[in-house]
Amino acid sequence: MTPHREVFALRLCALCVSLPTRLSYICIMQIFPLSEGSFTIDKSKLFIPFNTATDQLQERPVGSLLVEVQPFCVVTSEDIIVIDAGLGFEEGGQLQLHANLERAGIAPAQVTKVLMSHLHKDHAGGVSHTNAGGQYEMAFPQATYYVQRKEFAFAMEKGLPSYIPDELRCLETAPNVQWLDGNGVIDGYIKYQVTGAHSPLHQVFWIVDGGEMVFFGGDDAPQLQQMKSKFVAKYDYDGKKCMELRQQWWQQGEEEHWTFLFYHDIKSPVFKFG
């Protein structure tokens, strides 16, 4: 076992201790869902806003899916982490993701890490935003972005409608991007694994801090109900693999008391075993 993996393993059973850090949170992770709202999406791959109180799903095109678009902020004893970046919509001239963070009491400049499961437009729109000159710039210039190198290359090659290259291009030369190649561990406590399930280079994350485990499965595990059934989605790159991984993670999560974050769940963005 390599040294950084040893540290990760030790954190699984670590007891909470008081550590002086730049954050006021000591070994207890705090989770903030940063919802951009509910949407329907069909084969057109357009995200159409949906009001759950007044809109009727049956009035949308046949086959429309109802989803939440919900980045997360996880505050650990060491970092303020944003996981995926939403559609990148603006609210009163401000990136909605920034506004959501501020409502949670977190300044965007405090974010230290941005973890990207993949770069589909509903997950990566808030990677960047336009400045006063109309140019795209990094939405979190003080943070380190963690992106699979091959996922970026794939996104730029494939382009629309699943990816929006203009929103992603600034990643290529930004000094605060950490390019990942395959599986590994970040700073001894964030594990990432490429699954190739929802999309060819999709990755998932485990964050371990103070004896707690938070799991983010991105679009491999987007909704609570999918964890409880043998569901194969036609929109996944490898739907069978997605289903098998969800079953594996759900069983392991129950045994090890994981907290799950569900990016596209309307009702249950966070689920914790035990």
Image (cartoon, helix red, strand yellow):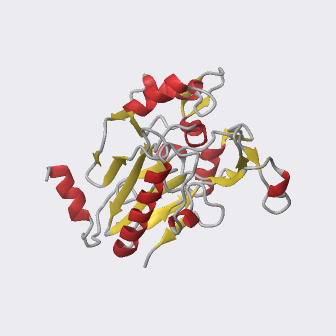
Residue 24 in percent (x, y) is at: 41, 62
Q: Nearer the viewer, residue 86 or 102?
A: 86
Residue plotted at (32% across, 67% down): 210
- Dividing the picture into quadrants, the one containing residue 196 is top left
Residue 25 showing in the rendered view:
no
Image height check: is 215 above or below 97?
Answer: below
Q: Nearer the viewer, residue 60 or 146?
A: 60
Residue 197 in percent (x, y) is at: 45, 47
Q: Nearer the viewer, residue 195 or 212?
A: 195
**Image quarter in which the C terminus is found:** bottom left
- Dividing the picture into quadrants, the one containing residue 46 is top right
Residue 255 in percent (x, y) is at: 35, 75
- Dividing the picture into quadrants, the one containing residue 235 is top right
Q: Is residue 226 left or right of residue 182?
A: right
Residue 66 showing in the rendered view:
yes
Q: Nearer the viewer, residue 266 or 162?
A: 162
Residue 144 in percent (x, y) is at: 40, 39
Q: Is residue 251 left or right of residue 108?
A: left
Residue plotted at (29% across, 55% down): 189
Residue plotted at (56% across, 55% down): 263
Count of numbered circles in the view: 0
Image height check: is 231 above or below 136?
Answer: below
Q: Farthest residue toward the bottom? A: 274
